[in-house]
């Protein structure tokens, strides 16, 4: 039985690596994760720094609450809003036309999917992701700010010389954890946005696993593909931890 399972698993890996979908789902998954990392990872840090500089307590609480709201909205509602806003008659669709683009539903164009997915992902998780950085900033010794102020440091200089160095360990840990799940692109949102015209750029590993495991009722094949995805994430995790440990002396272990 063991040898049969090992042979079956090996066959699933071979079939996946040689399939038409292999390069497409791996490239799409990596590109979506890469652009989410490039634009999405710094965004909560910048927002937390901005919140920290707001002096009005009421205004600060209101803006923070507004930034948290998208995280608690149902994903179905989020995807419906994306479709409505990017439709030809939607606000973003009309703006694209004013900027010289052709009349079209932006979400129906495969070339636009990466930008729409990453932009909506940042909007949805921006405020909630800033909470951990705000918590790290709240632990900074206020005497450091007073000393910098006495030395004549302005607001931006205090952010650069005091706040950022103090939260570097938190940033590094969050970066390692993010890289450790870089190939995890959730299938729920993509399936809700799916149309036949964008399969080329929207099909990722998780949607492929969903399709093989549930729709085509082939759980062993889907498990093999999911295992491949997990191995890639583990490699990124160990490499990121090793690099960060040598560069910044901050790491998970």
Image (tube, helix red, strand yellow):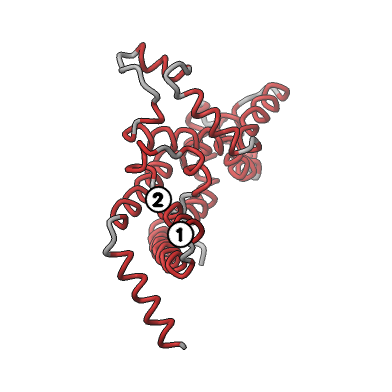
Q: Looking at the image, which residue is at 31% across and 67% down?
A: 15
Mark 2 vs mark 1, CA separation in Å: 16 Å
The image shows residue 220 at horizontal and vertical percentages of 46, 70
Residue at the far right: name it. Answer: 58
For residue 190, side relative to residue 203 (left or right): right
The image shows residue 44 at horizontal and vertical percentages of 53, 38
The image shows residue 84 at horizontal and vertical percentages of 51, 24
Local crowd size for mark 1, using a 10 Å CA cut-off: few (<14), some (14–19), many (≥20): few
- Name above or below for residue 29 compared with residue 213: above
Q: Which mark is residue 166?
A: none
Residue 34 seen:
yes
Query: Of label 2 and label 1, which has the lower sequence position?
Result: 2
Residue 153 seen:
no
Instruction: Find disc 2 in the rendering and name its residue.
Output: 204
Question: Image quarter for residue 52?
Answer: top right
For the residue pair 164 and 100, the one nearer the viewer reads as 100
Circle nearer the viewer, 2 or 1 = 1
- Name above or below for residue 164 compared with residue 207: above
- Name above or below for residue 34 compared with residue 181: above
Instruction: Find disc 1 in the rendering and name its residue.
Output: 216
For residue 242, side relative to residue 14 (left or right): right
């Amino acid at each position: 039985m063991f040898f049969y399972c090992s042979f079956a698993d090996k066959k699933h890996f071979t079939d996946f690596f040689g399939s038409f979908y292999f390069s497409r789902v791996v490239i799409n998954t990596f590109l979506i994760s890469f652009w989410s990392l490039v634009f999405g990872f710094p965004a909560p840090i910048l927002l937390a720094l901005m919140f920290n500089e707001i002096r009005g307590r009421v205004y600060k609480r209101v803006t923070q609450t507004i930034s948290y709201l998208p995280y608690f909205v149902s994903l179905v509602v989020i995807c419906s809003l994306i479709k409505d806003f990017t439709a030809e008659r939607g606000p973003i669709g009309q703006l694209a036309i004013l900027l010289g683009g052709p009349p079209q539903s932006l979400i129906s164009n495969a070339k636009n999917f990466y930008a729409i997915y990453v932009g909506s992902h940042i909007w949805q998780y921006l405020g909630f992701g800033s909470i951990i950085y705000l918590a790290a900033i709240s632990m900074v010794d206020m005497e450091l700010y007073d000393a910098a102020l006495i030395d004549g440091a302005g607001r931006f200089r205090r952010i650069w010389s005091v706040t950022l160095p103090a939260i570097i360990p938190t940033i590094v840990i969050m970066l390692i954890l993010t890289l450790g799940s870089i190939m995890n692109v959730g299938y729920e949102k993509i399936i809700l946005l799916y149309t036949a015209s964008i399969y080329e750029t929207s099909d990722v590993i998780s949607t492929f696993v969903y399709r093989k495991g549930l729709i085509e009722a082939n759980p062993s094949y889907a498990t093999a593909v999911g295992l491949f995805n997990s191995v890639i994430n583990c490699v990124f995790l160990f490499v990121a931890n090793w690099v960060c440990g040598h560069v910044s002396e901050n790491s998970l272990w």
